Amino acid sequence: MEVLKVNRLLSTTALFSSASTLICCALPALFVALGMGAAFAGLVSAIPQLVWFSEHKGVVFPIAGLLIAANGILLYRNRNAPCPLDPRLAEACKGTRVWSARIFWVAIVAYLAGAFFAFVAPRL
């Protein structure tokens, strides 16, 4: 049971850390590209803590990358782990694996989008 808690915690932190890369870099660029820069400026004025992610992107991205990689390793290691014999619990177990994999790929896409807008797009 302890392994499940660690896996759930790691999956959640990986998802939220990859979301922080979007907040810092991809969403501001998207809002400006869509002509909604004033809306994003209003959001930042309402929640000034969002600026911290942009100011510390050199720390945010490596931590997010490590969390996502660790989550990927755990997903890979547990891909063939046995599920309970009870049919209802077995189906829930399999469904959880599918959703964990989907969330993992969403986190990777979010991380790559944030990395592009943080490090590649400014140099173009």
Image (spheres, rainbow, N blue to C red):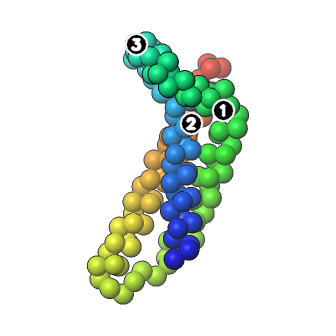
Q: Where is residue 6 in the image (x, y as percent from the top left)?
A: 57, 66
- The kind of residue tagged 2 is Thr
- Disc 2 crowd rating (10 Å Cα; few below 14, some 14-19, many 20+) is many
* Disc number for residue 87: none
Is residue 116 at all visible to an observer of this figure?
Answer: no
Q: Is mark 2 on a helix, strand or loop?
A: helix
* Disc number for residue 57: 1
User: What distance separates the C-alpha of mark 3 from that of mark 2?
Assistant: 21 Å
Most distant residue in the bottom direction? 85
User: What distance separates the C-alpha of mark 3 from that of mark 1?
Assistant: 24 Å
Q: Residue at x 55, y 38 (%)?
A: 20
Q: Which residue is drawn at 44% across and 60% down?
A: 100
Instruction: Specify whether 61 is left or right of 34.
Output: right
- Disc 1 crowd rating (10 Å Cα; few below 14, some 14-19, many 20+) is some
Disc number lying in front (3 or 1): 1
- The kind of residue tagged 1 is Lys
Q: What element carries label 3?
A: loop
Instruction: Specify whether 21 is left or right of 66.
Output: left
* Disc number for residue 21: 2
Relative depth, front residue between 122 and 16: 16
Quadrant where the C terminus is found in the figure:
top right
Judging by the rendered image, the residue that carries numbered circle 3 is 35
Relative depth, front residue between 82 and 13: 13
Q: Where is residue 50 in the image (x, y as percent from the top left)?
A: 55, 28
